[in-house]
Amino acid sequence: MPHTTGVRPEMVSRVIPVDPFDLVIFGGTGDLARRKILPGLFRRFRSGQMPEGAHVIGAARSDMDDAAYRDMVREAIGEHGGSEAKDSKALEHFLEHVRYVAVDARGNTGWDALKEVLREDEGLVRAFYFSVGPGLFAELAEGLRRHGLADAETRIVVEKPFGHDLESARALNEELARHFHETQIYRIDHYLGKETVQNLMAVRFGNMLFEPLWNSQYVDHIQITVAETVGVGGRGSYYDKSGAMRDMVQNHLMQLLCLIAMEPPARFEPDAVRDEKLKVIRALDPVDPDSIVRGQYTSDGTVNSYREDAENPLSKTESFIALKTYISNWRWANTPFYLRTGKRLSARASEIAVVFKDAPHSIFGIDAGRHSNVLSIRLQPNEGMTLGVTIKEPGPGGMRLVDVPLDMTFADALGPEAEEVPDAYERLIMDVIRGNQTLFMRGDEVEAAWAWTDPLIEGWQRRGDSPKPYDAGSSGPDDAAFLINRDGRRWRGVRQ
Ligand code: NAD
């Protein structure tokens, strides 16, 4: 039987180039393109994964020529491309693959010019990244068809937010479906592109150790935390119409919950995985009003309050939410899932914690202490996993138990190459070119997520609930602690 005795560096850094492609970034001058998409493409180019035959075409409203756009891209990569951006030879080489066309998504200008720069070569992948405001998604899809830029092989990448509620998500799905088949639509949730998220699946389904215990019989509860230190800042007026539930829970936290809770798919293939995720969402219970805590940050004297950031002195939008939910199926019946996310918290940290039940009986007596195993899956910072196991405290003086971490931080285990794993956007864009939809949300998943979210939002709106104030830099409102403490449990510390 084949087996691996260790991880060799070449196993980590092996890169297979993708097919040649034309990738058009609508919104190619915007914040997301400058911070994530373009630096990500540059890193993939430098690694050898983006081939020589690839073209990146920025498209936005501003009038500029290729040279001016390349200057902008050079600057963006210099600022956001990390240490690799210092490789100026590679950067200049990458820029030779970059072009720009001014296109107005709302009008007719620029489409013909865009058509001219796109190549018709056999086997060339054509993809359009909609990195523009959500109000333009449907128009862009329609424009691509009307101007003859898309055929049955063309792919579109759609950013978040995908709808504002079930009705708008359904309408957007219908609009897109008029022009593109579901297999051509890549709805992005960058949490799914994170290395640890995929590793979660490798750990769950590649080992015999965890899966037998992965159920309500052995798992006491699961916590999913996405804590941010930033406020809503410049996005205040947009965020105020959305709130933490729509901005984070309906998509990112829900996706993490699905991957933690889903049944093993028969294969690691797009529809097999997405079918299982959909079953989880459909099995989610409605949440009791007393199992939801919403919060809004107040000023600590050094930063604005939420209401100041949102420029809405009467805002009832939440910048923090904690909730407890259950999944009504055989595997998870009666196992609470505690979710929380918020802005202006004490640390930037995202973690999924699987907290196992206590051993049923301690043979060491009460004085030795009792500990439950926790599998902690960290998404940021320092992505990795830690399994807390109980051992004997070293030294004389009897049997005292202590928790030690079995650390699976990739960089430690796999060497420095593991630190160069692609970031989420890089990986996902390469998946688009490869035609692999496994890590993208299917239309019915998004709708099911809204179908669960909408009644919760309608509930607090109907009751006229106001979010609880919490201090900027704290761990959220006190009621969020009460939500879990009343069940005899505690939130795990939010640490950097
Ligand atoms: P942005 O406002 O910085 O950029 C918008 C881009 O769209 C600009 O390039 C602008 O020129 C272009 N644009 C606007 N109207 C146009 C039109 N009529 N025709 C052609 N181009 C037009 O926005 P952003 O922050 O880059 O966000 C883009 C999308 O990505 C949004 O849907 C946003 O919700 C999503 N997103 C952004 C981030 C982020 O970190 N910025 C994170 C997640 C998702």
Image (tube, rainbow, N blue to C red):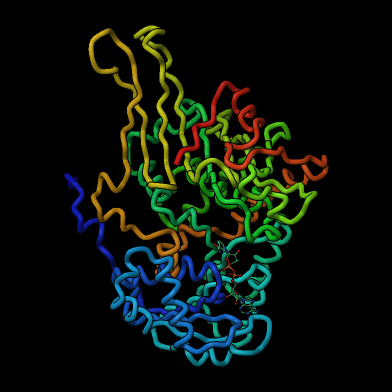
The percent position of residue 389, horizontal first and vertical second, equals 34, 26
The percent position of residue 449, horizontal first and vertical second, equals 63, 50
Most foreground residue, 316 or 282: 316
Q: Residue at x 33, y 31 (%)?
A: 405
Q: Residue at x 54, y 27 (%)?
A: 490
Does residue 372 appear left or right of residue 6 in this picture? right
Does residue 458 appear left or right of residue 142 in this picture? right
Can residue 177 be seen here? The reply is no
Task: Name the quadrant containing residue 174.
Answer: bottom right
Q: Is residue 324 above or below residue 66?
A: above
Most foreground residue, 12 or 307: 307
Q: Is residue 273 above or below residue 338?
A: below
Most foreground residue, 152 or 299: 299
Does residue 4 appear left or right of residue 422 in this picture? left
Q: Residue furthest front?
A: 301
The percent position of residue 15, horizontal first and vertical second, equals 28, 65
Quarter of the image where the N terminus is located: top left
Q: Is residue 312 above or below residue 339?
A: below
